[in-house]
Amino acid sequence: MIEALWPYIFIAVAGWLATDIWRWLGVLAGNRIDENSEMMHWVRAVATALVAAVIAKLIVYPTGELATSPLWLRIGAVAAGAAAFFLFRRNQLVGIIVAIGTLAAGLFALGA
Amino acid sequence: MDAEAISEGQTKRYWFVQGMRGIWSIPAIMLMLSFVGFAAFTAEGGIPVEQVMFMTGVVWALPAKVILVGSMLSGANLATTFIAVTLSSVRMMPMVAALVPEIRNSKTPTWLMLLLSHFVAITAWVFAMERAHRVPRTGRLAFFAGFGITLTSANILLVGIAYFMVTQFPPLVGACLFFLTPIYFLTSIWVSARHQVIYWSLGIGLVLGVVFHEVAPEFDILFAGLVGGTLAWAGERHWRLKRAAGVVR
């Protein structure tokens, strides 16, 4: 019984509780938090750097089908997407399409 | 559309449905494609589909789930996984704190805010921060709830279906779906940034994520976040104070 339930308990504690406590604290902080305090700047910076590290790992050390693609192609696709993103006034959709398109074209050319 | 003029007779249900229709917006579609990629990631890792659907509903935030699954696959224990996931979710607190004054009104009970805060993740946050101010205040919470609940439910179903389809995708499609998640996050953070420090920490965090993966792979995200975030904050603060001093002079 516990054997079958354990993955769900694991997900509930290490996933659900681990994320929702911050959402609840966010609600309670609500209006009281000073958006412009130095502490808030630091919290924002750490939060963003954490997500950035996740992004970097997904690009540089990918899993699944992407793992077989060369690193230079993935970095090149990000660079092409970034260039298009800024060229088109920070248009998110254009950035994504160019990045994915570059990757797809590169993989196709390499015979994937 | 003159929202102010027609809002008087509109019910909360109207704004809930308007929120639901956000499922067809660009950010929602990008997120759903990223979830197809996530389904592929979990299917390859061998996580049972019921657990994948369960975590999609209860965790919701995609970066937190990627870390959760990564930890589960590497056999990390409960405490280690909790720390990694919770540290990646600290950003929820300032995100929710910033959103609360945008969508609540004086009559909104706190328990309802606590309940609805669960639907906050990058996409719902960007969507609500961009559009909620165009909705009359009495309809904003319903608007956010309509979008958040629909998006979460749709993605629970989506991962359940995609899980069985992704293994049949040609490798090229699978690779593109895997690649969509980081690209989508990268552009989302950039377009939703309201403070200079976000750009600094994004750049430093990207570099340190790789550096710490090489030197301390088991704590890479944690270290990159704390060290990178602190460096970015200190650097941006130094630049900010210097600029302020320059303006005074």
Image (cartoon, coloured by chain):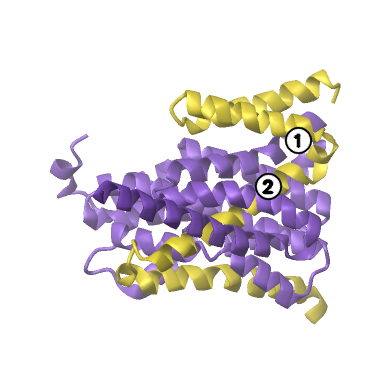
Chain colours: A yellow, B purple
- Judge the density around disc 2: few (<14), some (14-19), many (≥20) Cα neighbours within 10 Å: many
Rendered location of residue B41, percent (x, y):
75, 48
Q: Is residue A109 visible?
A: yes
Circle on res. B175: 1
Q: Which residue is mark 2?
A: A56
Q: Quadrant of the N terminus of chain A?
A: bottom right
> What amino acid is found at the position of numbered circle 2 in the picture?
Ala
Which label lies toward us, 1 or 2?
2
Q: Helix or strand or loop: what does disc 1 sit on?
A: helix
Q: Could you tell me which chain the residue with mark 2 belongs to?
A: A
Q: Is residue B170 visible?
A: no
Is B125 positioned to the left or the right of A111 in the image? left
Is B204 positioned to the left or the right of B45 in the image? left
Residue furthest bottom as drawn:
A2
Rendered location of residue A51, percent (x, y):
59, 54
Is B182 positioned to the left or the right of B6 in the image? right
Q: Relative to B16, does residue A16 appear above or below in the rendering?
A: below
Between B229 and B76, the residue placed more toward the observer is B229
Q: Helix or strand or loop: what does disc 2 sit on?
A: helix
Residue drawn at x 47%, y 67% is A23
Between B218 and B15, the residue placed more toward the observer is B218
